[in-house]
Image (cartoon, rainbow, N blue to C red):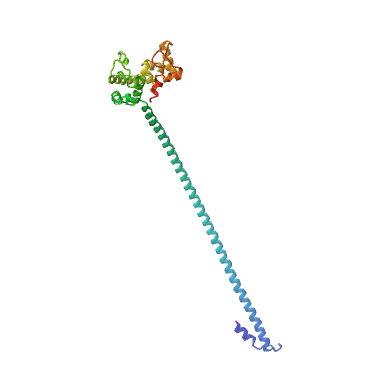
Amino acid sequence: MRAELRDAAFQPRRNADSPVRSRTEYRREYTDMSTRETTRTRRNTAGRAGGSDVDTGTGTGIQDRDSEKLQQERRRQRRELQKQRRAVEVRRQKRMLMIGAVLFIIIAVVGTRVMHRAWAKSKLSDAVLEYQDTVEKYAEREGISEYVDTLLAIMMVESEGRGEDVMQSSESKGLERNSLGPEESIEQACIYFSALIEIAEGLGIHDDRALIQAYNFGPGYLDYVAENGGSHHQKLATAYAKEKSGGEKVYYFHLYAIQKNGGWIYKFGNMFYNAIVQQYL
């Protein structure tokens, strides 16, 4: 392009009317044309470069927005995953707390019963404990092994393991008081207690306290219990003893009786019998 311009610039004008120009004028005109061409070329180049930058900027902006959206989605997914993990952990901790609470209650209940039994048995005299094997033997024969502790407590109240008729069961066999030896007394006591259980079941009574009180009052007390609510309580035993004694009272200097009423009972059995036996259970 520049060569053509240069050649054209130095060609003489063929129009005769045109004034003749010097070489210096031709060179100036050539320089001006070259400068204008260079300026146009630079502008075009800059325009193309600018368009490329705009296009590149637009593409980069789209990519940046897509990348930001992807990062936001990943952050949201991480938050959801963390929330789910926390929920699972909370449920696991709640289950562990519930299991721990249940185990604590079971251990507390069982431990309390074991400690109470140990404490109660520690109050039994050595003389009573010497008959434990005999009591277990006859209780098993009569099918009332679960009442061994009750029978030992009854023996503690009746005789503290001393004397011959250690269970005071001679009269339940229709014999004179204190007419049985220790083993016979225990055997008869197991037979008698088993019979009381059978009578109570027939009357719909499921109350061990009534059985214990009936050991002292006799089977008639179970009928009385069945007619008055089906469960033993102290007021019921007192009313039964009052009815059977005609209201007659006798002194009874047992600590329990002294604490309750100053030391007396109605003259029929022992209306505090169950309560006193329970002190050893």
Q: Where is residue 21 in the image (x, y as percent from the top left)?
A: 69, 88
Quarter of the figure that contains the C terminus: top left
Is residue 65 or residue 273 the one in the foreground? 273
| Relative height, residue 249 to residue 118 (above, below) | above
In the foreground, 122 or 167: 122
Residue sitting nearer the eye, 186 or 124: 124
Q: Can residue 207 be seen in this view?
A: no
**Number of on-image labels:** 0
Q: In this view, does 276 lie above or below 53?
A: above
In the shown orientation, is residue 12 left or right of residue 194? right
Residue at 37% in and 17% down = 216
Examine the rendering and report whether any part of residue 26 can be seen: yes
Quadrant the N terminus occupies:
bottom right
Which image quarter: residue 54?
bottom right
Residue at the spot x=57%, y=65% of the render? 57
Name the image quarter holding residue 4: bottom right
Residue 278 on image: x %, y %:
39, 23
Residue 228 in the image: state x and y as whole percent. Answer: 43, 17
Q: Where is residue 106 in the image (x, y as percent from the top left)?
A: 41, 34
Horizontally, residue 66 falls left or right of residue 120, namely: right
